[in-house]
Image (cartoon, helix red, strand yellow):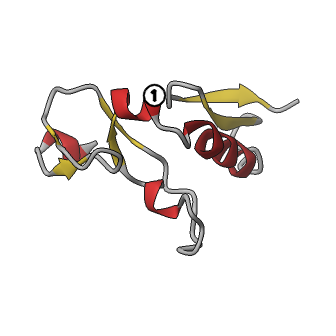
Amino acid sequence: MERIEAGRAHCALCGEVIRPGEDAMVTPDFLADEADPLWRFADAAMHRACFLVWDRRKAFIARYNQVARRLAATGGSYPRMTSEGDIVHEPMS
């Protein structure tokens, strides 16, 4: 979020500058394989409006949730991305 707040971020989806104060997000850095077609969208700044209409949003969220399910946090929870791109913590089942 620091990049966005400083006015130095471009949306990975539309390419436009993200201005401080705009509804924007930075996706988690969770993919290490540069050959993965979703790699360039991990640890990327995006306008939330662009993310919500992105044609690959569901695939991106599914991939994140698949990887994150293996990341048990202290207290027995794991991170999960919602359909809006927010990260919440779910209890391990």
Residue at position x 55%, y 58% in the image: 38
| In-image side of 25 versus 83 (left or right) | left
Give percent across and percent down for residue 54: 47, 37
Q: Residue furthest front?
A: 55
Q: 11 or 75: which is nearer to us?
A: 11
Secondary structure at badge 1 equals helix
- Screen quadrant of the N terminus: top left
- Screen quadrant of the C terminus: top right
Report crowding for label 1: few under 14, some 14 to 19, many 20 or more residues within 10 A (C-alpha).
some
Q: Is residue 48 above or below residue 41?
A: above
The reply to whether residue 18 is in sight is yes
Q: How many numbered marks does the figure carry? A: 1
Give percent across and percent down for residue 52: 45, 28
Give percent across and percent down for residue 62: 69, 41
Give percent across and percent down for residue 81: 60, 33
| In-image side of 63 versus 52 (left or right) | right
Choose top left, top right, bottom left or bottom right for residue 5. top left
The reply to whether residue 73 is in sight is no
Choose top left, top right, bottom left or bottom right for residue 27. top left
Residue at position x 50%, y 24% in the image: 84
Residue at position x 56%, y 43% in the image: 56
Q: 63 or 88: which is nearer to us?
A: 63
Disc 1 designates what residue? 52
Kindly identify the amino acid type of the residue bearing the numbered disc 1: Leu
Q: Is residue 55 above or below residue 90?
A: below
| In-image side of 13 versus 35 (left or right) | left
Residue at position x 36%, y 33% in the image: 50
Q: Residue furthest right?
A: 93
